[in-house]
Amino acid sequence: MDMDDAQGWHLVVLWRFPSRMLHQQPAELNPIFLPSDLETDWLLAKMFIRNADSIDHQAVHHLMKTHFLSEVYTVAALRSFSVIHPLYKMVLMAKALSETTYSSLCLPENITARGLESIPNFYYRDDGLKLWNIINRFVKAVVEYYYPSDSEVRKDTELQEWISEIFTHGFLGNTASGFPASFHTVEEAIKFITMLIFTVTGQQ
């Protein structure tokens, strides 16, 4: 939708100098741009407004009010509620969590399990697998550089503590989920880190 159609009345106010207050009355340091202005001026005005609105939405309403606050609620619930507390299951969506499997978060396995390999024009699969493979190649190169053998993975206590905490506290030690409680091989570490990066980038 064009901003002209969305406004009802065609008025865009730009704050030209950050040190000045923004007012609704036109002034030398507080210009008001109209559709009757130069086409480039009006286009730039709309671009500024859309950009400001997008930044506000993503940084405040999306990132802070959903992701960041969800983390606060979850961490506090894990630290404060016992597993039998009536709010524990409601707050943490324990049922959904208990049904979440490792393979469901690994896109190639998820696509196969759902029988979606050959459906035409399935852009989530096509684009998603491209991103997955790109991430996987990058992770493989980095991990194999620092962990030339499976024994190096097993000996890294920090790495093992990291995956153990994710399994124990993030997935409540549910072995049926298929989530690893520890890493035994380089390939296991590569797969998990690929899944993690894909989840917080392409999947998000």
Image (tube, rainbow, N blue to C red):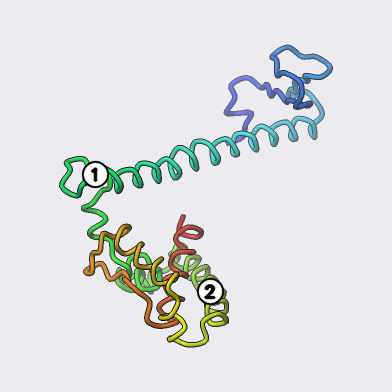
Q: The disc labelled 2 sits on which kind of residue?
A: Val
In the image, 183 versus 100, the foreground residue is 183
- Please report the residue visible at 55 percent of the width from the left and 40 percent of the height from the top: 59
Task: Give the residue at mark 1.
Answer: 81
Count of residue discs: 2
Q: Helix, strand, or loop for circle 2? A: helix
Determine contact: label 2, label 1, CB under 8 Å.
Answer: no
Going from the N terminus, do you reach mark 2 or mark 1 first?
A: 1
Separation of marks 2 and 1 at Cα, in angstroms:
36 Å
Q: Which quadrant: the N terminus?
A: top right
The answer to whether 122 appears left or right of 77 in the picture is: right
In the image, 78 versus 51, the foreground residue is 78
Compared with 120, 56 (above or below) is: above
Q: Position of residue 24 (x, y in %)?
A: 69, 14
- Please report the residue visible at 34 percent of the width from the left and 43 percent of the height from the top: 76
Dot 1 surroundings within 10 Å: few (below 14), some, or many (20 or more)? some
Q: Position of residue 57 (x, y in %)?
A: 54, 37
Compared with 182, 198 (above or below) is: above
Q: Nearer the viewer, mark 2 or mark 1?
A: 1
The answer to whether 192 appears left or right of 37 in the picture is: left
- Please report the residue visible at 44 percent of the width from the left and 64 percent of the height from the top: 196
Q: Position of residue 156 (x, y in %)?
A: 45, 76
Location of residue 154 by image quarter: bottom left
- Please report the residue visible at 25 percent of the width from the left and 64 percent of the height from the top: 173
The answer to whether 102 appears left or right of 33 in the picture is: left
In the image, 200 versus 80, the foreground residue is 80
Q: Which mark is residue 139?
A: 2
Q: Helix, strand, or loop for circle 1? A: loop
Residue sitting at the far top: 25
Q: Which mark is residue 93?
A: none
Q: Position of residue 12 (x, y in %)?
A: 69, 24
